[in-house]
């Protein structure tokens, strides 16, 4: 992150307004101003500029995030080697398990889903390509943290905290680090209803030949189906196999 003295206030305000539109699922000038605690005239000027440039749309009495961001996100994602290599393996995991399969990467200390696929029994959850999540409360995120240097883990926790999403979320730094050590030892991570009640998840890292983590893969589903040997043996093996395929493809293609 750039030093505070090097940041541009107007740019930061525009981005905060865009985030508010997403959080509020579209809103008028007054609602955005109230949400952010800034003047309505300021909000209006920024929204007008963003609309003129094609980044937001004005639908009656509400502004909404525009599809220009989809164009930018797709451009970024399509330039990532891991995306093309992970996409077919994620689809195969969904088909084999019947559940939701995902791939995610770390960016600015958060997990970002880059691709997902739904099996025939997959439950509807709040994930989608581009969604950002805290790393400490997901199997994907803990897998990523387990592969990072301890100094980087501390930086992420300092910046983002360990907020509770459910009663099962790890909110203590010492406990988190102990779990990360276990994940490194066994090679995969569990989410035991730590982000969403009723949902379990297993994740494994994608670590190419050079030893640098590039992504994590996961399979998630309801606790009634993700249990016993399926939770502890079957799905972890499928994930490690898929991760190995991706690692080989990245090394030799």
Image (tube, grey):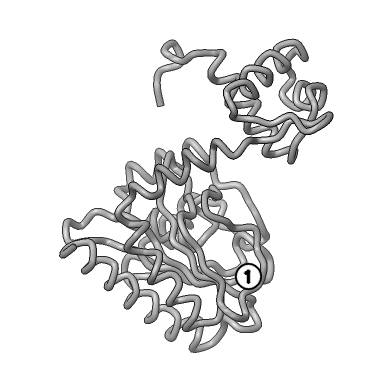
Query: Which residue is found at the position 39% from the left and 80% from the top?
Result: 238
Q: Is residue 231 left or right of residue 50?
A: left
Q: Estimate how packed mark 1 is, as few (under 14), some (14 to 19) or many (20 or more) residues with alpha carbons within 10 Å.
A: some
Q: Quadrant of the N terminus?
A: top left
Residue nearest the observer in this picture, 201 or 192: 201
Dot 1 corresponds to which residue? 199
Q: Is residue 228 above or below residue 122?
A: below
Of residue 28 and residue 162, the one placed in the foreground of this image is 28
Residue 138: image location, x then y, percent: 52, 60
Indicate the quadrant where residue 6 lies: top left
Residue occupying the point 28% across, 73% down: 245
Can you give x and y, in whole percent of width and height, for residue 140 in the image?
Answer: 46, 61
Q: Is residue 117 left or right of residue 233?
A: right
Residue 179 in view (yes/no): yes
Q: How many marks?
A: 1
Q: Examine the rendering and report whether any part of residue 189 can be seen.
A: no
Q: Quadrant of residue 227?
A: bottom right
**Above or below, comparing residue 83 to residue 89 in the picture:** above
Nearer to me, 251 or 184: 251
Which structural element holds mark 1?
A: strand
Quarter of the image where one finds residue 18: top right
Q: Along the line of sight, which residue is nearer the eye, 187 or 78?
A: 78
- 115 up-or-down from 204: above or below: above
Q: Which residue lies at the image location 62% right of the left edge and 63% below the top edge?
A: 168
Residue 41 image point, x, y percent: 75, 10
For residue 218, above or below residue 230: above
């Amino acid at each position: 992150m750039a030093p505070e003295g090097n940041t541009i206030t107007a740019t930061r305000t525009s981005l905060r307004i865009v985030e508010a539109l997403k959080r509020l699922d579209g809103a008028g000038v007054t609602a955005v101003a109230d949400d952010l605690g800034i003047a309505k005239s300021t909000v209006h000027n920024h929204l007008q500029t963003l609309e003129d440039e094609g980044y937001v749309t004005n639908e009656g009495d509400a502004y909404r995030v525009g599809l220009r961001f989809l164009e930018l996100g797709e451009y970024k994602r399509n330039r990532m080697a891991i995306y093309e290599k992970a996409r077919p393996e994620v689809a195969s995991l969904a088909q084999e398990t019947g559940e939701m399969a995902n791939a995610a990467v770390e960016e600015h200390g958060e997990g970002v889903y880059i691709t997902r696929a739904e099996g025939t029994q997959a439950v509807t959850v709040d994930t989608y390509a581009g969604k950002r999540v805290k790393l400490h409360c997901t199997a994907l995120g803990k897998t990523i943290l387990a592969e990072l240097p301890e100094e980087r883990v501390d930086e992420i926790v300092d910046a983002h905290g360990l907020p509770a999403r459910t009663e099962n979320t790890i909110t203590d730094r010492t406990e988190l680090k102990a779990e990360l050590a276990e994940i490194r030892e066994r090679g995969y991570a569990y989410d035991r209803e730590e982000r969403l009640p009723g949902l379990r998840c297993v994740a494994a890292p994608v670590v190419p030949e050079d030893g640098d983590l590039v992504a994590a893969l996961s399979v998630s589903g309801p606790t009634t189906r993700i249990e016993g040997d399926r939770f502890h043996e079957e799905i972890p093996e499928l994930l490690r196999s898929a991760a190995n395929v991706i690692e080989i493809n990245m090394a030799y293609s």
